[in-house]
Image: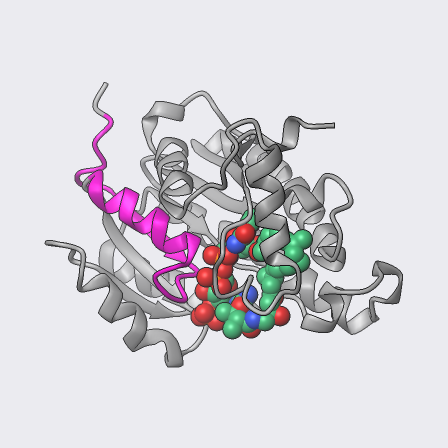
Amino acid sequence: MNFSLEGRTYVVMGVANKRSIAWGIARSLHEAGARLIFTYANDRFEQPVKDLVSTLDGQDALFYECDVTDDQAVSNTFTKIKEDVGTIHGLAHCIAFANKEDLQGEFVDTSRDGFLLAHNISAYSLVVTAKAAAPLMTEGGGIVTLTYLGGERVVKNYNVMGVAKASLDASMKYLANDLGKHGVRVNAISAGPIRTLSAKGIGDFNSVLKKIEEEAPLRRTITQEEVGDSAYYLLSDLSRGVTGEIIHVDAGYNILG
Ligand code: NDP
Ligand code: N5H
């Protein structure tokens, strides 16, 4: 079995900057020989993403704007991708959003709009992109999304995002069941805390990282590269018998009681 991704094409959604988990995934896929397609929420991020990708040697990437809250934008994006490359072999979904005021205090205070926004961008977006992307995976394929422990149990301040991640995790499993018959596998990586743009400005993030360093079985935090390599596993034939799974890339923190 050949585990190189040479001759394969993957869509990476959610690169904001060099700290993004999506960027760690892009680099792992690039090193394995894949051709990459990047999508970003709006054209404000087009040049920064292009500048980053220009640092990848010999990468002949394509770029598309795709706001995942817009059904037509998602559908148009994958129509264009089909016209431009034909077949794709996988997709990395690294997208989430909640209002800042909903990521502090008590979950009970979440507004209807804040709840719906978080679920729209962070969970439904997987469903709509999987529906648009799967038909392009004519040789079979893989979809990977990013989740967090706060969807499985209560984690301070994660609040509405925890409920959205629970919805994302369940959506991932239902999608795995629907798309399996077409040779498309759907899995999630539950990453440990990493300092990214999304995590910026979140109070107490240093103490979260410190707790991981003190208590996680590996006694350290994890990196974008480590998430990237697990995504490579899930998007390659190495994991050909795996679907509907959540792999924790979190230095073992989730096993603690
Ligand atoms: P980043 O801030 O780097 O990435 C978040 C991305 O979400 C951005 O690229 C942003 O795009 C995108 N996004 C937000 N709204 C939309 C939208 N409407 N349409 C399209 N894209 C949108 O943070 P991370 O790398 O940390 O986050 C990636 C994923 O990893 C998220 O699902 C997050 O929940 C998850 N995760 C993160 C952990 C961490 O500790 N950092 C831990 C566990 C999971 P743009 O920049 O173009 O607006
Ligand atoms: C328990 C925690 C800490 C508290 C909760 C953090 C939740 C973070 C997730 C969301 C995605 C962050 C978010 O939506 C931030 C936005 O309100 C403001 N930021 C932005 O708009 C920036 C500019 C853009 C790029 O961000 C997005 N998302 O578009 C969880 C942490 C220990 C782990 C963690 C940080 C998890 C996670 O899901 O990201």
Residue 22 highlighted magenta (yes or no): yes
The stretch of residues the image draws in magenta is 3-32
The residue lying furthest to the bottom in this view is 44
Q: From this view, report whether residue 113 is shown above or below residue 14.
A: below
Q: From this view, report whether residue 165 is shown above or below residue 215.
A: below
| Res 73 visible | no
In the rendered structure, the answer to whether residue 107 lies left or right of residue 14 reads right
Residue 171: % across, % down: 64, 44
Q: In which quarter of the image is residue 106?
A: bottom right
| Res 153 visible | yes
Q: Quadrant of residue 56?
A: bottom left
The residue lying furthest to the right in this view is 108
Residue 184 highlighted magenta (yes or no): no
Q: Name the colouring of the figure.
A: one colour
Q: From this view, report whether residue 109 is shown above or below residue 150.
A: below
Q: Which residue is painted at 32% across and 65% down in the image? A: 80
Report the front residue among 239 and 189: 189
Q: In which quarter of the image is residue 229?
A: top left
Residue 176: % across, % down: 56, 35
Report the front residue among 24 and 169: 24
Report the front residue among 225 and 93: 225
Q: How many labels does the image show?
A: 0
Q: In which quarter of the image is the C terminus?
A: top right
Q: In which quarter of the image is the N terminus?
A: top left
Residue 40: % across, % down: 40, 68
Report the front residue among 70 and 107: 107
In the rendered structure, the answer to whether residue 169 lies left or right of residue 200 reads right
Residue 72: % across, % down: 51, 71
Q: Which residue is painted at 39% across and 39% down in the image? A: 226
